[in-house]
Amino acid sequence: RKVAVLVSGTGTNLQALMDYASSVPNCTYKISLVLSNKKGVLGVQRAKLAGIPTQIINHKEFSSREKFDEAMDNLLTAADIEFICLAGFMRLLSGWFVQKWRGQIINVHPSILPAFKGINAHQQVLDAGVCVSGCTVHFVSEKMDEGAILAQETVPVYPEDTVEKLQERVKIAEHKIFPRALEVLTSGQAQLDKTKNKVLWRKHK
Ligand code: GRF
């Protein structure tokens, strides 16, 4: 299945998705396009190194979020994309875009949702003084970080942790679960039940 990965930054999750696709036999997804709203970011360089087509689409050149999303949608449709991964994509998506791609678009968030939504998740975790954090792969819905959950993994939080240390530990977990969740989705093992907003798992025979 053809997948597009949307990035705005370092793209370590993109790298994990690419590495999985090239190392796991019969992987059910192929990254056919990497879209970034920023040029010159490491994520784009990683895609280029791997020979994956890239497109930069600068949100500042559009008069509204809707127009920017429309341009992205055109690129995705032209490339016959079936699934979208948000991998550190730092733009909110408009309601119509999320509706159109509902069930086909997933995100990785650096906390155990529904706790610690939004930006600065690691700082929120440290401020709350919890002993466990982790990451979540979820379907994208109109409300930020609220879609049905496909995969989660926990990591410990240590008393001497900083945002950087915790982020590094959480990213290792992200790199494990994001490719697996994408594989589960693109292989049809799981799908979004749009009425219940729950993940529907295919039963084993
Ligand atoms: C990750 O921590 C992810 O959870 C969040 O953005 C970060 C992206 O990191 N949504 P990278 O660009 O994949 O290294």
Image (cartoon, rainbow, N blue to C red):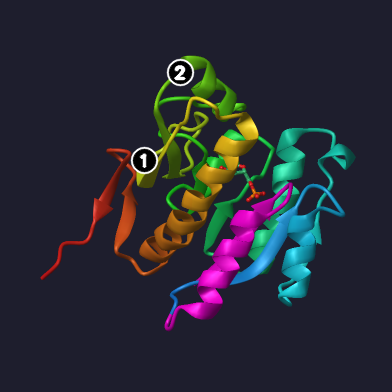
Q: Are marks 1 and 2 in contact (CB under 8 Å)?
A: no
Vertical position of residue 159 compared to residue 169: above or below: above
Dot 1 lies on which element?
A: loop
Vertical position of residue 82 compared to residue 107: above or below: below
Q: Position of residue 83 (x, y in %)?
A: 52, 60
Residues in magenta, as a range: 1-26
- What amino acid type is highlighted by mark number 1? Ala
Q: Viewed as shown, does residue 141 lie left or right of 192?
A: right
User: Residue, x 47% and y 16% (percent of image)?
Assistant: 128
Vertical position of residue 154 compared to residue 131: above or below: below
Local crowd size for mark 2, using a 10 Å CA cut-off: few (<14), some (14–19), many (≥20): few
- What amino acid type is highlighted by mark number 2? Gly
Q: Position of residue 9 (x, y in %)?
A: 74, 48
Outermost residue, front side: 160
Q: Name the image quarter holding residue 168.
A: top right
Q: Is residue 161 visible?
A: yes
Q: Quadrant of ligand 1?
A: top right
Is 92 in front, or is 26? Answer: 26
Q: Earlier along the polypeptide chain: callout 1 or callout 2? A: 2
Number of labelled discs?
2
Outermost residue, top side: 128
Residue at image mark 2: 129
Q: Name the image quarter holding residue 132.
A: top left
Outermost residue, bottom side: 25
User: Residue, x 47% and y 50% (percent of image)?
Assistant: 173
Mark in front: 1 vs 2: 2
Residue at image mark 1: 148
Residue 3 is covered by the magenta coloring: yes
